Image (cartoon, rainbow, N blue to C red):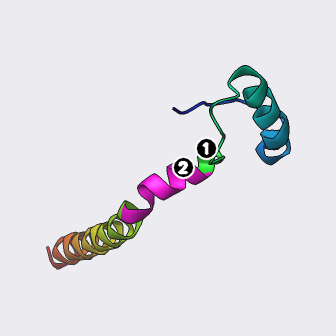
Amino acid sequence: MGIVVRTIGTPSAFTVPIKKALAEVLPDRPVSQVEIMEEIVRNSTGSRRFPMLLLSGFALLALVLAAVGIAGVANYL
């Protein structure tokens, strides 16, 4: 079971009060893992980040080569 809590301050400051509140409401369910949403998103997209950066680099290189080629043909004409 997962629970998402939105906080105004730093999320790590609320872990102990949230664990205590959950222990009062659901005493038979221990809280085993507390993660910040930024960490969850970073971990879920981490495996795709390097290939996307590599693909973006090649796309930028292709764009530069195309622009140089178009400028060369325009200057030749």
| Relative side of 38 to 48, left or right | right
Residue at 38% in and 64% down: 47
Q: Secondary structure at mark 1?
A: helix
Q: Position of residue 23 (x, y in %)?
A: 75, 30
Residue 32 sits inside the magenta stretch: no
| Residue 2 image-quadrant placement | top right
Which x, y percent locates residue 17?
Answer: 84, 34
Q: How many neighbours does mark 2 have within 10 angstroms: few (below 14), some (14-19), or many (20 or more)?
A: few
Residue 60's disc is none
The residue at 14%/73% (across/down) is: 77
Q: Are marks 1 and 2 in contact (CB under 8 Å)?
A: yes
Q: Amino acid at mark 2?
A: Ile
* Above or below: residue 30 compared with residue 73: above
* Along the line of sight, the residue nearer the viewer: 50 or 1: 1
| Residue 76 in the image: above or below residue 3 | below
Q: Nearer the viewer, residue 51 or 36?
A: 36
Res 13 quadrant in image: top right
Overall secondary structure of the magenta section? helix
Q: Which residue is mark 1?
A: 37
Total number of numbered labels? 2
The residue indicated by pointer 2 is 40
Q: Position of residue 46 (x, y in %)?
A: 44, 62
The magenta stretch is 39-47
In three-dimensional space, the C-alpha distance between marks 1 and 2, rounded to whole angstroms, equals 5 Å
Measuring 51% from the left and 32% from the top, which residue is drawn there?
A: 1
User: Identity of the amino acid at label 1?
Assistant: Met
